Amino acid sequence: MKRELNIFCAVIVLIIVSCKNDKKDVKTEATVKEKTFIKGTFGYDKSFLKQHYKETIVLESDNKKASIVISPELQGRVMTSSLNGDAGMSFGWINHDLITSKEVNNKFNPFGGEERFWLGPEGGQFSIFFKPNTTFDFENWQVPSFIDTDPFEVVAQDANSALFKKDITFINHSGTEFNLDVNRKIVLLNDAEIANNLKLSDVAYTAVAYESQNTVKNIGEKAWNEDSGLVSIWVLCMLNPSPEVTVVAPINQGSEDELGLKVNDNYFGKVEANRLTSTEQTVFFKADGKSRGKIGLSPKRATKFIGSYDAKNKILTILEIETPKKTDKYVNSAWELQEFPFSGDVINSYNDGPLGDAEQMGPFYELESSSPALALKPNESQTHVQRMYHFSGTEHHLDIISKQLLKVSLQDIQTAFQ
Protein backbone atom coordinates (compact mmCIF):
# COMPACT_ATOMS: atom_id res chain seq x y z
CA MET A 1 0.00 0.00 0.00
CA LYS A 2 2.92 2.36 0.63
CA ARG A 3 4.02 1.62 -2.96
CA GLU A 4 0.56 2.53 -4.28
CA LEU A 5 0.62 5.77 -2.29
CA ASN A 6 4.02 6.72 -3.75
CA ILE A 7 2.77 5.99 -7.27
CA PHE A 8 -0.33 8.11 -6.72
CA CYS A 9 1.79 10.97 -5.40
CA ALA A 10 4.01 10.78 -8.48
CA VAL A 11 0.94 11.08 -10.73
CA ILE A 12 -0.27 14.19 -8.94
CA VAL A 13 3.19 15.80 -8.93
CA LEU A 14 3.48 15.30 -12.70
CA ILE A 15 0.08 16.90 -13.28
CA ILE A 16 0.75 19.85 -10.97
CA VAL A 17 4.16 20.58 -12.50
CA SER A 18 2.71 20.36 -16.00
CA CYS A 19 -0.07 22.80 -15.15
CA LYS A 20 2.33 25.23 -13.49
CA ASN A 21 4.75 25.19 -16.40
CA ASP A 22 1.98 25.75 -18.92
CA LYS A 23 0.24 28.69 -17.28
CA LYS A 24 2.51 31.18 -19.06
CA ASP A 25 1.61 33.75 -16.37
CA VAL A 26 -1.93 34.03 -17.71
CA LYS A 27 -4.47 34.24 -14.94
CA THR A 28 -7.59 32.16 -15.45
CA GLU A 29 -9.84 35.10 -14.61
CA ALA A 30 -8.31 37.10 -17.44
CA THR A 31 -9.37 34.49 -19.99
CA VAL A 32 -13.06 34.93 -19.16
CA LYS A 33 -14.41 38.02 -20.86
CA GLU A 34 -17.74 37.82 -19.07
CA LYS A 35 -17.41 40.18 -16.10
CA THR A 36 -20.92 39.78 -14.73
CA PHE A 37 -20.16 36.60 -12.81
CA ILE A 38 -17.42 35.89 -10.30
CA LYS A 39 -15.40 32.71 -10.16
CA GLY A 40 -17.35 30.01 -8.39
CA THR A 41 -20.63 30.80 -10.11
CA PHE A 42 -22.24 28.78 -12.87
CA GLY A 43 -22.25 31.78 -15.19
CA TYR A 44 -18.48 32.14 -14.86
CA ASP A 45 -17.84 28.47 -15.65
CA LYS A 46 -20.32 28.40 -18.53
CA SER A 47 -18.64 31.40 -20.13
CA PHE A 48 -15.19 29.92 -19.54
CA LEU A 49 -16.11 26.60 -21.15
CA LYS A 50 -17.74 28.24 -24.16
CA GLN A 51 -14.54 30.21 -24.71
CA HIS A 52 -12.23 27.19 -24.54
CA TYR A 53 -14.26 24.51 -26.33
CA LYS A 54 -15.73 24.68 -29.83
CA GLU A 55 -18.97 23.08 -28.74
CA THR A 56 -20.73 23.19 -25.38
CA ILE A 57 -24.27 22.01 -24.71
CA VAL A 58 -26.39 23.77 -22.11
CA LEU A 59 -29.54 22.11 -20.81
CA GLU A 60 -31.78 24.21 -18.60
CA SER A 61 -35.23 24.18 -17.07
CA ASP A 62 -38.02 26.39 -18.36
CA ASN A 63 -37.25 29.03 -15.72
CA LYS A 64 -33.51 28.71 -16.52
CA LYS A 65 -32.69 27.95 -12.88
CA ALA A 66 -31.77 24.25 -13.10
CA SER A 67 -28.88 24.17 -15.59
CA ILE A 68 -26.04 21.90 -16.68
CA VAL A 69 -23.16 22.28 -19.15
CA ILE A 70 -21.97 19.27 -21.19
CA SER A 71 -18.79 18.95 -23.28
CA PRO A 72 -18.94 16.60 -26.31
CA GLU A 73 -15.17 17.14 -26.73
CA LEU A 74 -14.67 15.50 -23.31
CA GLN A 75 -16.71 12.33 -23.81
CA GLY A 76 -20.09 13.93 -23.16
CA ARG A 77 -18.88 15.02 -19.74
CA VAL A 78 -21.22 17.02 -17.50
CA MET A 79 -18.85 19.82 -16.58
CA THR A 80 -20.96 21.54 -13.93
CA SER A 81 -24.49 22.36 -12.79
CA SER A 82 -26.48 25.00 -10.97
CA LEU A 83 -29.85 25.18 -9.23
CA ASN A 84 -30.02 28.98 -9.50
CA GLY A 85 -29.02 29.72 -13.07
CA ASP A 86 -25.95 31.76 -13.97
CA ALA A 87 -25.80 33.44 -10.55
CA GLY A 88 -25.91 30.13 -8.70
CA MET A 89 -23.08 28.11 -7.17
CA SER A 90 -21.17 26.00 -9.70
CA PHE A 91 -21.15 22.45 -8.31
CA GLY A 92 -18.62 20.77 -10.62
CA TRP A 93 -14.88 21.15 -10.06
CA ILE A 94 -13.16 22.44 -13.22
CA ASN A 95 -9.40 22.57 -13.73
CA HIS A 96 -9.29 26.09 -15.19
CA ASP A 97 -5.50 26.23 -15.28
CA LEU A 98 -5.08 23.00 -17.25
CA ILE A 99 -7.81 23.92 -19.72
CA THR A 100 -6.32 27.40 -20.20
CA SER A 101 -2.85 25.96 -20.87
CA LYS A 102 -4.17 23.96 -23.87
CA GLU A 103 -1.39 21.46 -23.26
CA VAL A 104 -2.02 17.70 -23.40
CA ASN A 105 -0.32 15.31 -21.00
CA ASN A 106 0.40 11.84 -22.39
CA LYS A 107 -0.61 10.11 -19.16
CA PHE A 108 -3.68 11.86 -17.80
CA ASN A 109 -5.46 15.17 -18.27
CA PRO A 110 -7.55 15.99 -15.20
CA PHE A 111 -9.81 18.54 -16.85
CA GLY A 112 -12.35 18.09 -14.06
CA GLY A 113 -16.07 17.88 -14.62
CA GLU A 114 -19.01 17.01 -12.43
CA GLU A 115 -19.68 13.65 -14.09
CA ARG A 116 -17.43 11.80 -16.51
CA PHE A 117 -17.55 8.40 -18.22
CA TRP A 118 -14.69 5.97 -17.63
CA LEU A 119 -14.11 2.24 -17.92
CA GLY A 120 -12.46 -0.08 -15.40
CA PRO A 121 -10.45 -1.83 -14.18
CA GLU A 122 -7.54 0.51 -13.65
CA GLY A 123 -5.06 -2.10 -12.41
CA GLY A 124 -4.63 -5.86 -12.31
CA GLN A 125 -4.16 -8.48 -14.99
CA PHE A 126 -7.25 -7.21 -16.83
CA SER A 127 -6.35 -3.52 -16.61
CA ILE A 128 -7.06 -1.17 -19.50
CA PHE A 129 -4.59 1.42 -18.12
CA PHE A 130 -1.51 -0.83 -18.52
CA LYS A 131 -0.44 -2.36 -21.83
CA PRO A 132 0.47 -6.07 -22.09
CA ASN A 133 3.90 -7.12 -20.84
CA THR A 134 4.35 -4.05 -18.63
CA THR A 135 4.78 -3.82 -14.89
CA PHE A 136 2.34 -1.96 -12.66
CA ASP A 137 4.52 1.11 -12.27
CA PHE A 138 3.83 4.77 -12.83
CA GLU A 139 6.03 4.87 -15.93
CA ASN A 140 3.69 2.38 -17.64
CA TRP A 141 0.38 3.79 -16.41
CA GLN A 142 -1.70 5.73 -18.93
CA VAL A 143 -5.34 6.79 -19.06
CA PRO A 144 -6.63 5.68 -22.48
CA SER A 145 -7.38 8.60 -24.78
CA PHE A 146 -10.96 7.43 -25.37
CA ILE A 147 -11.81 8.31 -21.75
CA ASP A 148 -9.45 11.26 -21.50
CA THR A 149 -9.08 13.47 -24.57
CA ASP A 150 -11.11 11.92 -27.41
CA PRO A 151 -14.40 13.60 -28.36
CA PHE A 152 -17.74 11.78 -28.50
CA GLU A 153 -20.12 12.28 -31.41
CA VAL A 154 -23.37 14.14 -30.71
CA VAL A 155 -26.07 11.81 -32.02
CA ALA A 156 -29.18 13.67 -30.88
CA GLN A 157 -30.13 16.68 -28.81
CA ASP A 158 -33.31 18.36 -27.61
CA ALA A 159 -34.26 20.85 -24.90
CA ASN A 160 -33.81 18.37 -22.05
CA SER A 161 -31.30 15.78 -23.24
CA ALA A 162 -28.24 15.00 -25.33
CA LEU A 163 -27.03 11.65 -26.70
CA PHE A 164 -23.38 10.85 -27.44
CA LYS A 165 -21.69 7.92 -29.18
CA LYS A 166 -18.20 6.46 -29.53
CA ASP A 167 -16.84 3.19 -30.97
CA ILE A 168 -13.81 1.99 -29.03
CA THR A 169 -11.17 -0.69 -29.56
CA PHE A 170 -8.44 -1.56 -27.05
CA ILE A 171 -6.36 -4.45 -25.69
CA ASN A 172 -6.24 -5.12 -21.95
CA HIS A 173 -3.16 -6.06 -19.93
CA SER A 174 -3.77 -9.76 -20.59
CA GLY A 175 -3.84 -9.21 -24.36
CA THR A 176 -7.59 -9.53 -24.89
CA GLU A 177 -9.04 -7.27 -27.57
CA PHE A 178 -12.28 -5.44 -26.86
CA ASN A 179 -14.49 -3.82 -29.48
CA LEU A 180 -17.34 -1.87 -28.02
CA ASP A 181 -19.91 0.75 -28.79
CA VAL A 182 -20.57 3.37 -26.12
CA ASN A 183 -23.76 5.41 -25.91
CA ARG A 184 -24.08 8.07 -23.23
CA LYS A 185 -27.32 10.00 -22.77
CA ILE A 186 -27.63 12.93 -20.36
CA VAL A 187 -31.15 13.94 -19.31
CA LEU A 188 -32.00 17.02 -17.25
CA LEU A 189 -34.71 15.96 -14.80
CA ASN A 190 -37.70 18.17 -14.08
CA ASP A 191 -39.37 18.71 -10.70
CA ALA A 192 -41.96 15.99 -11.23
CA GLU A 193 -39.30 13.43 -12.19
CA ILE A 194 -37.19 14.32 -9.15
CA ALA A 195 -40.16 13.92 -6.80
CA ASN A 196 -41.23 10.67 -8.46
CA ASN A 197 -37.76 9.10 -8.54
CA LEU A 198 -37.07 9.79 -4.88
CA LYS A 199 -40.66 9.48 -3.62
CA LEU A 200 -40.57 12.98 -2.19
CA SER A 201 -43.84 14.56 -1.08
CA ASP A 202 -44.77 17.56 1.05
CA VAL A 203 -41.19 18.82 0.88
CA ALA A 204 -40.21 22.28 -0.38
CA TYR A 205 -36.85 22.62 -2.09
CA THR A 206 -34.94 23.99 -5.06
CA ALA A 207 -33.02 21.40 -7.06
CA VAL A 208 -30.99 20.57 -10.12
CA ALA A 209 -30.83 16.92 -11.14
CA TYR A 210 -29.77 14.91 -14.15
CA GLU A 211 -29.53 11.29 -15.20
CA SER A 212 -26.75 9.66 -17.23
CA GLN A 213 -27.58 6.50 -19.13
CA ASN A 214 -24.28 4.81 -19.99
CA THR A 215 -24.57 1.85 -22.36
CA VAL A 216 -21.76 -0.44 -23.50
CA LYS A 217 -22.32 -2.95 -26.33
CA ASN A 218 -20.00 -5.76 -27.38
CA ILE A 219 -19.56 -5.25 -31.14
CA GLY A 220 -16.75 -7.78 -31.40
CA GLU A 221 -16.93 -11.40 -32.53
CA LYS A 222 -16.11 -13.02 -29.19
CA ALA A 223 -17.90 -13.12 -25.85
CA TRP A 224 -16.29 -11.38 -22.89
CA ASN A 225 -15.50 -13.77 -20.04
CA GLU A 226 -13.76 -13.79 -16.67
CA ASP A 227 -10.79 -15.85 -17.89
CA SER A 228 -9.67 -13.23 -20.42
CA GLY A 229 -10.99 -10.21 -18.55
CA LEU A 230 -14.08 -8.06 -18.21
CA VAL A 231 -14.64 -4.31 -18.15
CA SER A 232 -17.03 -2.17 -16.16
CA ILE A 233 -18.71 1.20 -16.61
CA TRP A 234 -17.17 3.67 -14.16
CA VAL A 235 -18.76 7.09 -13.57
CA LEU A 236 -16.88 9.68 -11.51
CA CYS A 237 -18.12 13.01 -10.17
CA MET A 238 -15.66 15.78 -9.23
CA LEU A 239 -17.33 18.30 -6.92
CA ASN A 240 -16.27 21.52 -5.23
CA PRO A 241 -15.61 21.06 -1.52
CA SER A 242 -16.05 23.37 1.42
CA PRO A 243 -14.66 23.14 4.97
CA GLU A 244 -17.96 21.58 6.07
CA VAL A 245 -18.67 18.86 3.48
CA THR A 246 -19.34 15.38 4.86
CA VAL A 247 -19.95 12.37 2.61
CA VAL A 248 -22.70 10.08 3.90
CA ALA A 249 -23.08 6.47 2.79
CA PRO A 250 -25.93 4.36 4.14
CA ILE A 251 -24.89 0.71 4.38
CA ASN A 252 -26.56 -2.65 4.81
CA GLN A 253 -26.41 -3.78 8.41
CA GLY A 254 -24.83 -7.08 9.36
CA SER A 255 -21.74 -8.71 10.78
CA GLU A 256 -18.39 -8.67 9.02
CA ASP A 257 -18.54 -12.46 8.81
CA GLU A 258 -21.74 -12.13 6.80
CA LEU A 259 -21.19 -8.95 4.75
CA GLY A 260 -17.49 -8.15 5.04
CA LEU A 261 -15.99 -4.79 6.03
CA LYS A 262 -18.34 -1.86 6.46
CA VAL A 263 -16.05 0.26 4.34
CA ASN A 264 -12.82 -0.25 2.42
CA ASP A 265 -10.39 2.60 3.14
CA ASN A 266 -7.20 0.86 2.03
CA TYR A 267 -6.80 2.54 -1.35
CA PHE A 268 -4.00 5.02 -0.57
CA GLY A 269 -3.24 4.00 2.98
CA LYS A 270 -5.68 3.97 5.87
CA VAL A 271 -7.82 7.07 6.23
CA GLU A 272 -7.20 8.95 9.46
CA ALA A 273 -9.63 8.12 12.25
CA ASN A 274 -10.75 11.74 12.58
CA ARG A 275 -11.86 11.69 8.91
CA LEU A 276 -13.74 8.41 8.72
CA THR A 277 -16.27 7.00 11.14
CA SER A 278 -19.21 4.62 10.96
CA THR A 279 -22.25 3.29 12.79
CA GLU A 280 -24.13 0.09 12.09
CA GLN A 281 -26.04 1.76 9.27
CA THR A 282 -23.93 4.72 8.08
CA VAL A 283 -20.41 5.63 6.98
CA PHE A 284 -19.28 9.26 7.38
CA PHE A 285 -16.26 10.62 5.47
CA LYS A 286 -14.83 14.15 5.56
CA ALA A 287 -14.68 15.68 2.08
CA ASP A 288 -13.15 19.09 2.63
CA GLY A 289 -10.40 18.83 0.00
CA LYS A 290 -7.69 18.96 2.66
CA SER A 291 -6.48 15.37 3.03
CA ARG A 292 -6.13 12.65 0.40
CA GLY A 293 -8.05 9.47 0.96
CA LYS A 294 -10.55 7.15 -0.69
CA ILE A 295 -13.26 4.80 0.52
CA GLY A 296 -15.31 2.11 -1.19
CA LEU A 297 -18.40 0.02 -0.48
CA SER A 298 -18.81 -3.57 -1.65
CA PRO A 299 -22.03 -4.79 -3.31
CA LYS A 300 -22.91 -6.52 -0.04
CA ARG A 301 -22.70 -3.26 1.91
CA ALA A 302 -23.71 -0.59 -0.61
CA THR A 303 -27.25 0.70 -1.05
CA LYS A 304 -28.59 2.67 -4.01
CA PHE A 305 -27.58 6.00 -2.44
CA ILE A 306 -24.51 7.91 -1.39
CA GLY A 307 -24.57 11.63 -0.69
CA SER A 308 -22.96 14.62 0.94
CA TYR A 309 -24.02 17.61 2.96
CA ASP A 310 -22.30 20.97 2.68
CA ALA A 311 -23.23 22.63 5.99
CA LYS A 312 -21.54 25.88 4.97
CA ASN A 313 -23.55 26.39 1.79
CA LYS A 314 -26.61 24.39 2.91
CA ILE A 315 -26.48 22.02 -0.09
CA LEU A 316 -27.56 18.38 0.10
CA THR A 317 -26.20 16.20 -2.73
CA ILE A 318 -27.54 12.74 -3.55
CA LEU A 319 -26.09 10.20 -6.00
CA GLU A 320 -28.47 7.38 -6.93
CA ILE A 321 -27.87 4.11 -8.78
CA GLU A 322 -29.80 0.87 -9.13
CA THR A 323 -29.71 -1.13 -5.88
CA PRO A 324 -26.61 -3.38 -6.12
CA LYS A 325 -27.15 -7.13 -6.07
CA LYS A 326 -25.04 -8.83 -3.42
CA THR A 327 -24.10 -11.56 -5.89
CA ASP A 328 -22.84 -9.21 -8.61
CA LYS A 329 -19.12 -9.10 -9.35
CA TYR A 330 -17.18 -5.82 -9.67
CA VAL A 331 -13.73 -5.31 -11.17
CA ASN A 332 -10.74 -4.84 -8.87
CA SER A 333 -8.49 -1.88 -9.77
CA ALA A 334 -5.50 -2.59 -7.51
CA TRP A 335 -2.12 -2.10 -9.24
CA GLU A 336 -0.98 -5.72 -8.91
CA LEU A 337 -1.61 -9.20 -10.22
CA GLN A 338 -4.76 -10.07 -8.29
CA GLU A 339 -5.91 -13.24 -6.64
CA PHE A 340 -9.50 -11.95 -6.73
CA PRO A 341 -9.91 -9.73 -9.83
CA PHE A 342 -13.70 -9.44 -9.41
CA SER A 343 -13.88 -8.39 -5.78
CA GLY A 344 -14.09 -4.62 -6.31
CA ASP A 345 -16.37 -1.93 -4.91
CA VAL A 346 -19.56 -0.52 -6.40
CA ILE A 347 -19.61 2.94 -4.77
CA ASN A 348 -16.62 5.13 -3.89
CA SER A 349 -15.73 8.56 -2.55
CA TYR A 350 -12.38 10.31 -2.86
CA ASN A 351 -11.17 13.39 -0.99
CA ASP A 352 -8.35 15.39 -2.55
CA GLY A 353 -5.58 16.94 -0.47
CA PRO A 354 -2.05 18.32 -0.57
CA LEU A 355 1.07 16.25 -1.10
CA GLY A 356 4.07 16.47 1.18
CA ASP A 357 5.25 19.67 -0.52
CA ALA A 358 1.80 21.26 0.03
CA GLU A 359 0.95 21.16 -3.69
CA GLN A 360 -2.28 19.57 -4.89
CA MET A 361 -4.36 19.18 -8.02
CA GLY A 362 -7.69 20.35 -6.59
CA PRO A 363 -9.16 20.82 -4.14
CA PHE A 364 -12.17 18.66 -4.97
CA TYR A 365 -13.95 15.57 -3.76
CA GLU A 366 -15.53 12.74 -5.72
CA LEU A 367 -18.57 10.52 -5.61
CA GLU A 368 -18.23 7.47 -7.88
CA SER A 369 -20.22 4.45 -8.99
CA SER A 370 -19.49 1.38 -11.12
CA SER A 371 -21.51 -1.16 -13.02
CA PRO A 372 -21.03 -4.88 -12.42
CA ALA A 373 -18.34 -6.53 -14.56
CA LEU A 374 -19.74 -6.85 -18.08
CA ALA A 375 -19.83 -10.44 -19.33
CA LEU A 376 -21.37 -9.65 -22.71
CA LYS A 377 -21.83 -11.88 -25.73
CA PRO A 378 -21.51 -10.36 -29.23
CA ASN A 379 -24.23 -7.74 -29.82
CA GLU A 380 -25.26 -7.79 -26.15
CA SER A 381 -25.29 -4.53 -24.20
CA GLN A 382 -25.66 -3.31 -20.64
CA THR A 383 -26.61 0.09 -19.24
CA HIS A 384 -25.45 1.73 -16.02
CA VAL A 385 -27.74 4.56 -14.89
CA GLN A 386 -26.62 7.18 -12.40
CA ARG A 387 -28.61 10.15 -11.14
CA MET A 388 -27.16 13.23 -9.48
CA TYR A 389 -29.28 15.60 -7.36
CA HIS A 390 -28.36 18.87 -5.63
CA PHE A 391 -30.92 20.28 -3.16
CA SER A 392 -31.21 23.68 -1.52
CA GLY A 393 -33.86 24.69 0.99
CA THR A 394 -34.58 25.23 4.65
CA GLU A 395 -32.75 22.99 7.08
CA HIS A 396 -36.12 21.51 8.05
CA HIS A 397 -36.89 20.32 4.53
CA LEU A 398 -33.34 19.22 3.76
CA ASP A 399 -33.47 17.24 6.99
CA ILE A 400 -36.59 15.43 5.77
CA ILE A 401 -34.85 14.49 2.51
CA SER A 402 -31.70 13.36 4.32
CA LYS A 403 -33.63 11.15 6.75
CA GLN A 404 -35.62 9.58 3.93
CA LEU A 405 -32.71 8.85 1.56
CA LEU A 406 -29.57 8.71 3.68
CA LYS A 407 -31.29 7.48 6.88
CA VAL A 408 -29.65 10.14 9.06
CA SER A 409 -30.54 13.68 10.12
CA LEU A 410 -28.56 16.78 9.28
CA GLN A 411 -27.61 16.99 12.94
CA ASP A 412 -26.24 13.43 12.77
CA ILE A 413 -24.11 14.46 9.78
CA GLN A 414 -22.83 17.70 11.34
CA THR A 415 -21.92 16.02 14.65
CA ALA A 416 -20.41 12.85 13.17
CA PHE A 417 -16.84 13.98 13.93
CA GLN A 418 -17.45 15.82 17.20
Image (cartoon, grey):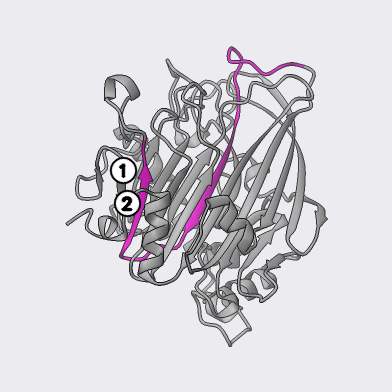
- Residue type, numbered disc 1: Thr
Q: Give the quadrant of the N terminus.
A: top left
Please give the name of the residue rendered at 65% of the width and 64% of the height, measured from the top-left corner. 69
Please give the name of the residue rendered at 77% of the width and 21% of the height, measured from the top-left corner. 378
Q: Please, is residue 34 above or below residue 226 in the view?
A: below
Q: Is residue 244 magenta?
A: yes
Residue 285 is left or right of residue 149, and the answer is left
Is there a contact, CB below 8 Å, between mark 2 and mark 1? Answer: yes
Q: Where are the magenta residues, as a range?
A: 222-251
Residue 211 is left or right of residue 367, and the answer is right
Residue 180 is left or right of residue 208, and the answer is right
**Percent position of residue 149, x then y:** 66, 50
Task: Name the residue at the front extreme.
Answer: 202
Question: Residue 408: which disc?
Answer: 2
Q: Please, is residue 274 above or below residue 205 in the view?
A: above
- Residue type, numbered disc 2: Val
Please give the name of the residue rendered at 44% of the width and 38% of the height, measured from the top-left corner. 303
Q: Please, is residue 398 above or below residue 104 in the view?
A: below
Looking at the image, tell me whether mark 2 or mark 1 is earlier in sequence order.
1
Task: Name the residue at the bottom extreme.
Answer: 36
**Residue 22 in view, yes or no:** no
Identify the element where label 2 is drawn. loop
**Percent position of residue 312, x then y:** 34, 70
Q: Local crowd at mark 2 within 10 Å, few (<14), some, or many (≥20)? A: some
The residues bearing labels 2 and 1 have C-alpha atoms spaced at a distance of: 8 Å
**Residue 124 in view, yes or no:** yes
Of residues 144 and 384, which is closer to you in this image? 384
- Give the labeled residue for mark 1: 282
Q: Local crowd at mark 1 within 10 Å, few (<14), some, or many (≥20)? A: some
